[in-house]
Amino acid sequence: MPRDSLHQGTWDASAPAADEVLAWCGNDGGSIARRDDLVRTKDTSVKAAVDDEEARHSRWTLCCLSRQPLQPPVVVDRLGQLYNKEALLEYMIRRAKKAASVSEHEVARHIKSVKTDVRQVTLHANPVQEAERGDIHYFPYACPLTQRVMNGKHKFVCLWPCGCVVSETGLRETCLAGRSKRELIQPHACPQCARAFLPDALVAEEPRWGADVVWLYPSRAARDALQAQRQARPKRKAAPQP
Ligand SMILES: [Zn+2]
């Protein structure tokens, strides 16, 4: 299967933070590491790797706001974050009462309306049942086109017009194989539900705020780029007072 190379620079769903820890633990140019230092280093890097696994599992299975398992109806925002809709509504009520926490604001401050700022998604169940896998971490969703598991190791996208969640590779191979770049500015049919979407963002260097193809949990750099685009948008004019 061809490996996508266009977005690798900005996609870090399985960013190996443990490597950074290993680099950080390197010798400081002259001192001789003692055995207990090495043991501590090994313990630290193992713990970092375990923490990374936990974080990846949480990200792809829990609501980003309530930290509860994703439970339909699930919605996505323009930053590619997944929420339990009920948890989002509860946060918005708390926010209106000035009772929401700082951490909640950091996640969802930008959502002003559940009608326009989020979209309900359709998640495809992982065809391999948890009992069959026997893994420590089970990921309950997969791509309906390729059956790739939505576990942070494969890039996933949501089609904003219909809410279908698919792997980027599956979407490319199903919709775009053999098409010219010019054709990417034409509407295509969602391979799951046939609703039209514009695939142009699939070949962009970075995600675009408002595009029909929303990257789920992009890298920090891509997320920052999206936030900058959001803030640069012209503000909606206030309705004239009667
Ligand atoms: Zn669809």
Image (cartoon, rainbow, N blue to C red):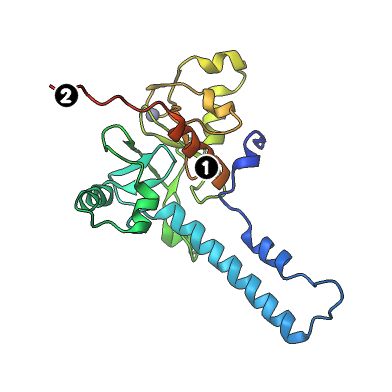
Task: Give the side of residue 161 with respect to residue 6, left or right.
Answer: left
**Where does the image place residue 44, in percent across and percent down from the top left?**
63, 74
Query: Could you say which is closer to the camera, residue 110 or residue 13?
Result: 110
Identity, as a three-letter code, of the amino acid under mark 1: Asp
Q: In percent of the image, x 49 and y 66: which residue is there?
A: 136
Q: Is mark 2 within 8 Å of ligand 1?
A: no
Q: Which mark is residue 241?
A: 2
Mark 1 crowdedness (10 Å alpha carbons): few <14, some 14-19, many ≥20: few
Q: Are marks 1 and 2 in contact (CB under 8 Å)?
A: no
For the image, the number of numbered tags is: 2
Screen quadrant of the C terminus: top left
Disc 2 secondary structure class: loop
Ligand 1 image position (quadrant): top left
Q: Earlier in the sequence, mark 1 or mark 2?
A: 1
Identity, as a three-letter code, of the amino acid under mark 2: Gln
**Where does the image place residue 33, in percent across and percent down from the top left?**
80, 81
Mark 2 crowdedness (10 Å alpha carbons): few <14, some 14-19, many ≥20: few
Q: In percent of the image, x 61 and y 31: which residue is there?
A: 205
**Where does the image place residue 125, in percent across and percent down from the top left?**
39, 46
Quick check: 18 above or below 211? below
**Where does the image place residue 140, in percent across and percent down from the top left?**
41, 52
**Disc number lying in front (1 or 2):** 2
